[in-house]
Amino acid sequence: MPRAQSNRSDEDSGLPPGSPLRICFVAYRGNMHCGGQGVYLWFLARELARLGHQVDVLVGPPYPDAMPFVNRVTALPNEQFWGKWFLKERRHFIPQPRPLRIFEPLNFYELAASYLGFLPEPLAFSLRALREVANRLRTGTHYDIVHDVQCLGYGILGIRKLGVPVVTTVHHPLTVDRRASFARDESLRAAIGTMTFYPVAMQGFVARRLDGLFTSSAESARVIRQDFRIPRERIRMVANGVDTELFQPSPGVERDANEILCVGRASDPNKGIGNLIEALARLPHPLRLTLVDDDHPDSPARKLAARLGCADRLQITGRIDNGELVRRYRRASLVVVPSRYEGFGLPAVEAMACGTPVVACAAGALTEVVGAAGGGVLVPPDEPDALASAIADLMARPEIRSMLGKRGSVRVNEAFAWPRVARATAGAYAEIIEDFRTRLGRPARITTSDSPGSSRAMRSSPFSVD
């Protein structure tokens, strides 16, 4: 691909100190229900736009909710061959109404890679994003920075070669998911499948060559340093955020004295739902658990509850919208986060923002998050007895729950509200852009609402990188 004219020089950059930045997000999955990256994309883009920055979004399916606050959202479709293969929907492989699209190079690659057991999405999306960004730069669009959201495909390096600084956010590297997959593999064939499925080598290669890497916890930073071999000084701590306009207490909502709430996928062993169901079986009646998860006949949570004799005290909601999720956080007496690993722990933060106390496992970043907010208690991971004991203790002490809920809500607002996260992110952008242009011999001082002082925004983070 020919090199495109990508960024104006200092003289015609039109970016005096304090000016808005022109930001392009690239995210290979954008819907909030597909993982934390969708939540991160939507809210960070919104808050950056509120600060006056111009934001474009290039995104793959499943697509985000409407984003009227950004300049432009461009869908980069794919045929989702991997999902169809995984769900055994092979009759839907032939694209309609244009079946010959299956022979387009990236479509054919995704089909072949899915057949061979690889995850093709990150690479294919990154190449589509590279093509789109190159076309825009060639026709006069200018970006000050491109922000990749956990894709790390080789095409992201191509974007950087066009003369635009590129940063990425990694909530946790795919090595974490790969280790969890190895732990549940029961045959050599399954282990070989795990080894080939995750594009870990590509992600590490790309991450080491970008202009900045953002992550949301000291634990994630530690794993990124260890698994991707990235020096500590290249990792920037910008905590993840929570929408405190939506997730907030409501004194008018009465708590259900017997309801425990958990938000997590039972199909993901890292979420520890099996341990929570075992804990539920040890808890007395009338305590019951509401699990926010897909509800289907093969749910491992439902099967385990039936085997342990507590199925009558388990409700699985199926997918719910944010409004219903907030209502359930406010109504529950306690939220449990039994995860065996979290790069951040969004359900814990959302619950505390709503004034609901949390019992969480001391695993991954949950120790940092719950510790910073002070809205809950921690127990050892993979110990259902300890989990049941902590739940029973808090459920029997409403005054302690009330104290934890009030404290957690206040501190979450101070540490994790999206406006704060966006200001810190914009400050980091400004530093990275300045460093990038200086290396190119085009020194430029760019400031935002936190500059000079983006370092101040970094220092005010509740986390450290040690």
Image (cartoon, rainbow, N blue to C red):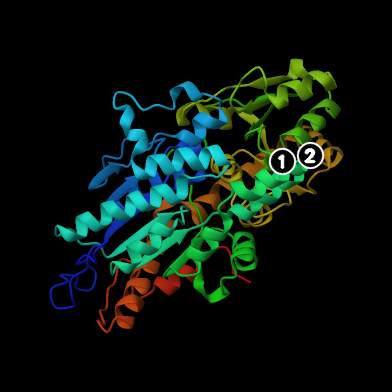
* Above or below, comparing residue 146 to residue 444 in the picture: above
Q: As shown in the figure, which amino acid type bears the numbered disc 1?
A: Ala
Residue positioned 38% across, 44% down in the render: 106
**Could you tell me residue 33's position as x and y percent?**
49, 34
The percent coordinates of residue 45 (x first, y second) are 35, 50
Up-down: is 199 above or below 111? below
Residue 248 visible in image? no
Task: Mark 1: give few (<14), some (14-19) or many (20+) Cα within 10 Å.
Answer: few
Q: Vertical placement of 316 versus 423: above or below?
A: above
Task: Determine which quarter of the picture holds residue 104.
Answer: top left
Three-letter code for the amino acid on which mark 2 is drawn: Glu
Choose between 99 and 405: the one closer to the eye. Answer: 99
Distance between mark 1 and mark 2 Cα atoms: 7 Å
Residues marked 1 and 2 touching at CB (< 8 Å): yes
Residue placed at 60% from the left, 28% from the top? 293
Q: Is residue 206 left or right of residue 47?
A: right
Quadrant, the N terminus: bottom left
Nearer to us in this view, 360 or 440: 440
Left or right: 68 in relation to 85:
left
Label 2 SS: loop
Camera sees residue 431 = yes
Q: Quadrant of residue 63?
A: top left
Q: 202 or 211, which is in the foreground?
A: 202
| Mark carried by residue 190 | 1
Residue 196 location, x and y as percent?
Answer: 62, 49
For this view, does 393 lie left or right of residue 167?
Answer: right
Q: Which mark is residue 186?
A: 2
